[in-house]
Amino acid sequence: MRPGRFVEIGPGAGHVTALLLDAGWTGVAYDLEASTVSAVIKRFSKEIESGRFHAETRNWLSVNVDEQVDLVISCMVMEHFDDEGERAFIDAAKSCLVPSGLMVALVPASLDHWGIEDEIAGHFRRYSYATVRTKFESLGWQVRHLAGLTFPISNMLFPVSNYLVRKSEARKLSLSMVERTKQSGIRDVPMKTNFPSVFGLLLNETTMIPLHWVQKLFLRSNKAMVLYIEATPSP
């Protein structure tokens, strides 16, 4: 896509934000957690100073959009809403986009892989190809592209992941769903979300290319644990 204006809901540590800004986009990010927004503001202080980026601690659904944007993007956000909130979220994205605009979303997938990570993060659901397509089309969207990510690597590591998350974050199960959602943006799980720097010798784009190729072979697998979605409002 030609660079334009974006809205990002749930920026996390700002990895996707960085990709967009580096590609020439301008935009705004919203998150419920103040510490997440503070970290993003610190990371992108130069872009904020130049007027290319803005971040707010705010519920995006309560924002009155003054100017429509070309791209709405959310990574691991939709699953945090109940059914009513999910519909409101998708409808808000439609009202926020220019007629030719695009929504990009990443969501957890594979119904058989509900686990401790869903519980501690405050998820209401995991998705499938069918449920994603049905949901968007029923709300007046055209699904342009669906792809399953991370299969079979994440599936092989799923038991280890559950162990690490339970060991590090089980205490979050006592929190409300809203608080779990707020704390899901930037997580600290040793050997899952962060690693000793020496692991960079193994975990880098060059050494991981073979696994990337393997995963691309299975982009239609119903067992993929993440779904990538591109959708546009129907005419």
Image (cartoon, rainbow, N blue to C red):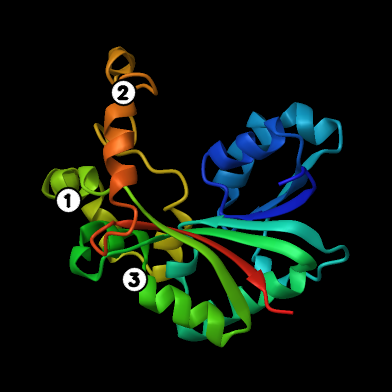
Residue at mark 3 to residue at mark 1: CA–CA distance: 21 Å
Q: Position of residue 40 (x, y in %)?
A: 62, 38
Q: Earlier in the sequence, mark 3 or mark 2?
A: 3
- Circle 3 sits on which residue? 128
**Residue 186 appears in the rendering:** yes
Residue at mark 2 to residue at mark 1: CA–CA distance: 20 Å
Q: Of helix, strand and loop, which one carries label 2?
A: loop
Q: Are marks 3 and 1 in contact (CB under 8 Å)?
A: no
* 2 or 1: mark nearer the eye: 2
Q: Earlier in the sequence, mark 2 or mark 1?
A: 1
Q: Which mark is residue 116?
A: none
Name the residue: 18% across, 68% down.
Answer: 112
Mark 3, Cα crowd under 10 Å, few <14 / some 14-19 / many 20+, is many
Q: Which mark is residue 162?
A: 1
Image: 232 above or below 152: below
Q: Position of residue 22 (x, y in %)?
A: 69, 30
Q: Are marks 2 and 1 in contact (CB under 8 Å)?
A: no
Q: Of helix, strand and loop, which one carries label 1?
A: helix
Left of 55 or right of it: where is 49? right
Amino acid under disc 1: Asn
Q: Quadrant of residue 191?
A: top left
